[in-house]
Image (spheres, helix red, strand yellow):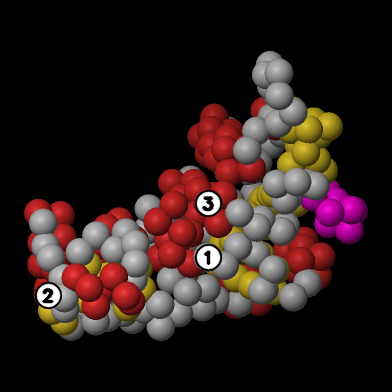
Amino acid sequence: MYLTGFHAIEERIKSGRPCGPLLVAKSGPRAKEIVTLAVNNKIRLERTGTFDLDGLAPDNRGIALQVQDEGGNTDISLDKFISDLGERRDALVLILDEITDPHNYGAILRCCDQFAVDLVVSRNRRNAKHAEVISKTSAGAVSWVAQAETPNLARAMEDLKEAGFWIYGAEMEGEPVYKKDFSGRVAFVMGSEGSGISRLLREHCDAMVSIPSAGRIDSLNVSVAAGVLLYEVIRNRMLRR
């Protein structure tokens, strides 16, 4: 597959993960910067015609980066993540329950990068898989945020509990998020855009939290809600230092 967004290409190269060649059909100022970055990181360049590049990567802006995976940092298992924590406290995990809109998925990853989420956990083959859209929407954060896939989210939640995580589900009827103490190991569960958190995963949560709202519509978009909750964790922890 090919990454075509400037930010997505740039962050993938900076991440040091395998990629290339970088296909170049035309190079404006922004593309030239990325070409220089690729050369400095020993990424192979290939000059190509506009027509040929349009056939390989229709949404290109004169350049496209070939990658052999789906563009994400998914090469970690939940078991390894937990093992690598050691004695560390204040770890933060986000669990995504059937997030199917790739724009939401990418926006959530961007929030995770900004608010220092240690791991995103999703169900394999069931989450948003439009890699190019996700990469663009996340502004390249997909190359940095660690992601683990699992066939069983409920089991993953129990594994996190055994590792000392307190798991919160996000829903409108929960306790206001600002009343909670988010020190220690914490995980949030974000539900799907349409039906929210599934009954099974809700039963595995330790508590439910909500974002107080004065709006007239039902709820926040899931990616916006994720950003608010993750910011609250950072704010909460800074106040308790």
Above or below, comparing residue 225 to residue 48 in the picture:
above
Q: Amino acid at mark 2?
A: Val
> Is 97 within the magenta?
no
Question: Camera-side residue: 113 or 107?
Answer: 107
Residue on which the image places disc 2: 39
Q: Quick check: marks 2 and 3 in contact, CB under 8 Å?
A: no
The part of the chain drawn in magenta is 197-206
Residue on which the image places disc 3: 103
Above or below, comparing residue 148 to residue 111 in the picture:
below
Q: Is residue 204 left or right of residue 194?
A: right
Q: Using the numbered discs, state the Cα–Cα distance from disc 2 to disc 1 in whole angstroms.
A: 28 Å
Q: Residue at x 51, y 78 (%)?
A: 75
- Foreground disc of the pair 2, 1: 1
Neighbour class for label 3 at 10 Å: few (<14), some, many (≥20)?
some
Above or below, comparing residue 160 to residue 29 in the picture:
below
Residue on which the image places disc 1: 130
Quadrant in the rendering for residue 46: bottom left
Q: Position of residue 17 (x, y in %)?
A: 35, 77
Quadrant in the rendering for residue 65: bottom left
Going from the N terminus, do you reach mark 3 or mark 1 first? 3
